[in-house]
């Protein structure tokens, strides 16, 4: 019987081969419908051409699309399409043809070979055919696909891959070009396949034109623009807003918006971006923001002005799944096909340096955009050089204009190799900072914890920001009582939001309110205190902290004090040692913290001190050598290091339901986003203490580094997860 089956299989293959010359070559099947390979290649090629044409490389996009699936012309793949359960490599074929053609075609090799698996490392000559590297893949044995010649003509490449005379570093530019072209290909491939599978009814929408959005903004700000005052808060905001509108007409390039707290930079930056986008026929505006709290606030402002359908909020706390109403937004999140995108530093930069198709898919939609880097001082120091190299590349070769937007402008000019001028958008910058000065600074030097606590209990409404979660818990526990609160990431997000609401209510009612917090309150949190105590940190952090003092400008400067202090003991603050050392040096020199020159000097000193550590993982080195190691860079470029374990706190009714869903239905993106509201991250050392004490259990065997807190006594409504856990504690102690 087995032998008979074997003979039947051989006969089927023979029949298949006999009919191969006259057969229809199929790329996709769905419920009786078929899409031919040629139709798929042409559909993908046309879409990829349109995407790449935005940055002047339409011929490359078209060629990539026409060759990416020619491996599907193999007999083995066609048998797979007919239902045989066999694996077939169809991606290597097009890459091999490009290599054989020579000339400029080999530049397409990595894009085509990796259009499913991701962009590979270049590899070495020792790599075998089963290696995932480019050189390894060249040795791989693949099925005969020559039948493609009967249907497919190889398109001509007419332009060079990069404009050599217009770039500071050829190799880095080639790596960016490869990713951009890869993005065009994978998005076009996804969209053409989706179009076939849904019969053109995917539900994708694109939002309104930039000119329509500019009209909406101009109507929204019309009354503001009538203000002719010069020496009121609203008058100054109008002056900044008008300047941003006017400078939106300036040539594309790199800009800076240095606006003090309270200067209205959110709407002013949007005004510049829309005017600029309309002037130069740009496709979208991308806001890149370090904190999700700021993202949520800004996105809400943008939706109010521009309409919900035009604003895509893309970060880990947003869930578009499971709702037919939000289907279009879910689809837009895949490739950023919306006129205004609001996202995080992590999402933006990790996508730019990723090798994965899912992350790279959106990249081509960054071209011909206005990018606003809000809180630009928060660009990641460990990856500053590759991040700035990417920004410069986008400006020079992908029709991007970028705006560095902050009250504490970092000294970034020396890092740009070919951009020699940054245009400031804020008029009379120094005068604006003097006008918006709302506090006076006091350098208290070293304070004992005892003295600090004595000062805090005497305050009516004060914020004290310290550098570690452990210290925040210690100080809170020492002075806790009526009107005293704690805030840190030891509390899960929903808990923090609930606490912030209580704090705001108490402040508004004029009641006693003392808050002990970590730096999480320094941005995106709308709180207004009489006094702010800030443990010494980077100058930018100190100024951000000062923005929580007299925020509304209702008190005099004399009534509004920011106290900078140091503790007697030497406290380790991970990742902050150099920032603290530079600040100490500047304070010793008695610099005025509020002066723009002090901020500039701070960043100059910090960047000089950090030196090569501004590219901690040697990302530029991996891309500049000519042997582009895309997979290595994709693994190494992580703005948030994965040295933490996630702890789920199951003490609210919604949390209990989420936990049940996780256990019963598995881990979906939607459920994990809901779960994130009840999670606290622990560093590995602290996790081990908890785990050894028997206070945790895995939520599921399928999910690593995700645990449930089973000893809920270790979580306090006041301070969150207890950080004083000892090895000797256990569930029975």
Image (cartoon, rainbow, N blue to C red):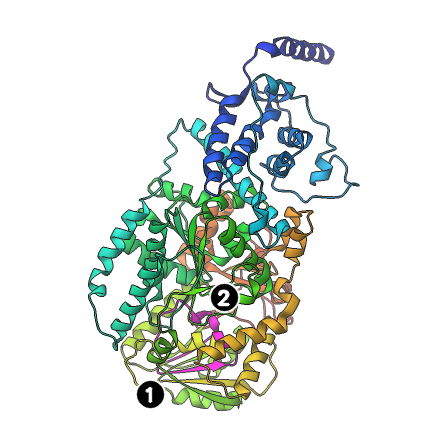
The residue lying toward the viewer, choosing from 211 and 157, is 157
Considering the image in quadrants, where does the C terminus appear? bottom right
Residue 197 in percent (x, y) is at 45, 28
List the single residue furthest toward the right: 126
> Circle 1: is it few (<14), some (14-19), or many (20+) Cα within 10 Å?
some
Reading the image, the residue beneath label 2 is 378
Q: Classify residue 83 by image quadrant.
A: top right
- Label 2 SS: helix
Considering the image in quadrants, where does the N terminus appear? top right
Q: Residue at point 50% right, 75% down?
A: 600
Q: Residue at point 30% right, 85% down?
A: 556
Q: Is residue 307 visible?
A: no
Question: Is residue 471 positioned above or below 269 on the image?
Answer: below
Q: Pointer 1 and pointer 2: residues touching (CB < 8 Å)?
A: no
What's the distance in space between the residues labelled 1 and 2, CA to CA? 30 Å
Instruction: Find out whether residue 517 is within the magenta segment.
Output: yes
- Label 1 SS: loop
Circle on res. 228: none
Reading the image, the residue beneath label 1 is 559
């Amino acid at each position: 019987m087995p032998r008979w089956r074997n003979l039947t299989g051989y006969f089927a293959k023979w029949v298949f081969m006999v009919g191969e010359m006259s057969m229809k070559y199929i790329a996709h099947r769905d419920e009786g419908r078929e899409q031919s390979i040629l139709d798929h290649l042409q559909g993908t090629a046309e879409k990829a051409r349109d995407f790449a044409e935005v940055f002047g490389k339409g011929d490359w996009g078209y060629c990539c699309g026409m060759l990416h699936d020619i491996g599907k012309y193999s007999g083995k793949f066609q048998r797979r399409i007919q239902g045989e359960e066999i694996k077939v490599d169809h991606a290597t074929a097009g890459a091999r043809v490009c290599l054989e053609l020579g000339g400029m075609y080999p530049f397409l090799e990595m894009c085509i070979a990796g259009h499913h698996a991701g962009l590979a490392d270049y590899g070495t000559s020792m790599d075998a055919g089963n290696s995932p590297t480019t050189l390894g893949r060249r040795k791989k044995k693949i099925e005969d696909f020559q039948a493609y010649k009967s249907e497919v003509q190889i398109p001509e490449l007419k332009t060079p891959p990069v404009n050599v005379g217009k770039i500071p570093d050829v190799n880095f530019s080639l790596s960016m070009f490869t990713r951009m072209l890869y993005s065009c290909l994978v998005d076009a491939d996804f969209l053409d396949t989706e179009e076939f599978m849904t019969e053109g009814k995917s539900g994708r929408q694109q939002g309104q034109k930039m000119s329509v959005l500019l009209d909406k903004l101009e109507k929204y700000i019309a009354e503001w623009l009538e203000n002719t005052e010069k020496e009121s808060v609203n008058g100054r905001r109008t002056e900044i807003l008008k300047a941003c509108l006017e400078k939106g007409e300036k040539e594309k390039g790199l800009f800076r918006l240095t606006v003090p707290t309270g200067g209205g930079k959110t709407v002013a930056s949007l005004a510049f971006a829309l005017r600029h986008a309309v002037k130069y026929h740009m496709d979208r505006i991308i806001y890149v923001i370090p904190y999700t709290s700021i993202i949520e606030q800004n996105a809400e402002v943008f939706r109010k002005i521009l309409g919900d359908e035009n604003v895509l909020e893309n970060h880990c706390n947003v869930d578009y799944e499971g709702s037919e109403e939000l289907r279009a937004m879910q689809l837009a999140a895949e490739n950023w096909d919306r006129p205004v995108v609001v996202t995080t530093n992590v999402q933006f930069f990790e996508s730019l340096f990723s090798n994965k198709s899912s992350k790279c898919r959106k990249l081509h939609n960054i071209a011909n955009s206005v990018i606003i880097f809000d809180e630009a001082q928060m660009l990641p120091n460990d990856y500053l050089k590759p991040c700035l190299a990417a920004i410069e590349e986008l400006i020079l070769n992908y029709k991007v204009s970028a705006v560095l937007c902050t009250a504490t402008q970092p000294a970034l000019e020396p890092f740009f190799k070919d951009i020699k001028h940054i245009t400031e958008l804020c008029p009379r910058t120094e005068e604006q900072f003097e006008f918006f000065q709302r506090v006076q600074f006091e350098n208290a030097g070293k304070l004992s914890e005892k003295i600090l606590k004595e000062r805090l209990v005497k305050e009516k409404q004060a914020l004290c920001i310290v550098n570690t979660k452990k210290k925040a818990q210690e100080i809170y526990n020492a002075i806790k009582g009526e009107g005293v609160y704690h805030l840190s990431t030891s509390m899960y997000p929903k808990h923090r939001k609930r606490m912030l609401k209580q704090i705001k209510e108490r402040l508004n009612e004029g009641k006693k309110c003392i808050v002990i917090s970590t730096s999480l309150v320094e941005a995106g949190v709308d709180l207004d205190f009489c006094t702010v105590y800030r443990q010494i940190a980077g100058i930018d952090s100190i100024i951000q902290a000062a923005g929580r003092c007299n925020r509304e400008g209702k008190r005099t400067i004399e009534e509004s004090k920011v106290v900078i202090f140091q503790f007697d003991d030497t406290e380790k603050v991970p990742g902050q040692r150099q920032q603290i050392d530079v600040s100490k040096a500047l304070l010793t020199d008695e610099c005025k913290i509020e002066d723009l020159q002090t901020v500039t000097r701070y960043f100059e000193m910090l960047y000089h001190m950090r030196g090569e550590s501004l590219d901690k993982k040697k990302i530029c080195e991996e891309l500049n050598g000519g042997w582009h190691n895309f997979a290595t860079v994709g693994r190494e470029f992580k703005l948030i290091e994965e040295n933490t374990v996630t702890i789920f706190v199951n003490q609210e009714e919604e949390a209990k339901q989420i936990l049940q869903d996780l256990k019963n239905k598995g881990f979906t993106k939607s459920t994990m986003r809901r779960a994130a509201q009840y999670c606290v991250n622990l560093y590995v050392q602290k996790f081990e203490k908890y785990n050894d004490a028997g206070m945790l259990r895995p939520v599921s065997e399928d999910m690593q580094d995700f645990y449930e807190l089973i000893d809920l006594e270790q979580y306090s409504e006041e301070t969150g997860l207890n950080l004083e856990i000892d090895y000797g504690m256990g569930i029975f102690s």
